[in-house]
Structures are given as C-alpha cells and as structure tokens.
Amino acid sequence: MKTISEDRSYVDYTTAFFGVRVRRTSCETIALSDSEWAEYGDKLPLPVTESALDPSVSDEVGDLAINVVDYELCDAGGIQEARHELRGVLLGKISVDDALSSPVSMGNLATD
C-alpha cells in the first residue's frame, strides 16, 4: 500500500508487516510495531543503485532489497498499482516530489 504522510515529508510503501519509507533525499526500511510504522536499519541516500535492490548480487542481502522484493511480490490490495513506482522512486526514475503529490501510483513512469 502507498501512504503519503500528512505533512507530505515522506511516502511509505508497505506490505502487511514491512515496507520502505522514502523521503526527498533518503530511504529507510520500516516495520509494523504496535500498530505504528517504525524505521529500522540504515538510512540510504537517494537514488540507490540497481545492485542495492537486487538480492542476487550479494551474499549479504540488505533489508532494503528484501523489503522491495517482498513489496513487489505482495498480492495485497493497493500494492499492484505501486509495485513499479517504489523501484522507480528509489532509482531516481520517478521524483520523490511526484510520488508525494500523487496518491495514485505512478508505476507506468518507472518502466519507461
């Protein structure tokens, strides 16, 4: 599911328990904890590299790659539309401001 923060400072892309929070200059993995989304792990500057999102590249797969792949494979409602948008935003193919300004997924732009 794609959720834009009330103050429009970040957008969350989440599955049932894990996700990715994207701010204008960075991203961080998040997990559901006591009904709240909590940041954990390393804060990474945007854009990230393609290899940072590819779990087959390294034996030490980071949480970001795991959460992105989990998000892209999830069949839950609302995620289908935003699957490609998350990857596009992380790679810099879609601007964070565009993702923040649109409650609807912009996934079609990520594949151009």
Image (cartoon, grey):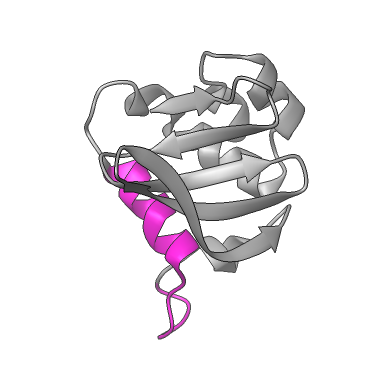
- 63 is within the stretch colored magenta: yes
Of the pair 89 and 109, the residue shown nearer to us: 89
Quadrant including the C terminus: top right
Tell me if residue 112 can be seen: no
Q: What range is drawn magenta here? A: 56-73
- 9 is within the stretch colored magenta: no
Q: Quadrant of residue 8?
A: top right
Question: Percent from the top left, x then y, of residue 73?
Answer: 28, 44
Quadrant including the N terminus: top left
Question: Percent from the top left, x then y, of residue 105?
Answer: 51, 20
Q: Is residue 92 above or below residue 95?
A: below
Q: Quadrant of residue 98?
A: top right
Residue shown at 42%/42% (left/top)?
A: 37
Q: Is residue 88 above or below residue 39?
A: above
Question: Percent from the top left, x then y, of residue 3?
Answer: 48, 25
Decide if residue 76 is on the left or right side of residue 110. Answer: left
Tell me if residue 6 can be seen: yes
Question: Percent from the top left, x then y, of residue 109?
Answer: 62, 26
Decide if residue 52 is on the left or right side of residue 78. Answer: right
Of the pair 19 and 95, the residue shown nearer to us: 19
Residue shown at 60%/19% (left/top)?
A: 6
Secondary structure mainly formed by the magenta segment: helix
Residue shown at 34%/26% (left/top)?
A: 80
Decide if residue 86 is on the left or right side of residue 16. Answer: right
Outermost residue to the left:
75
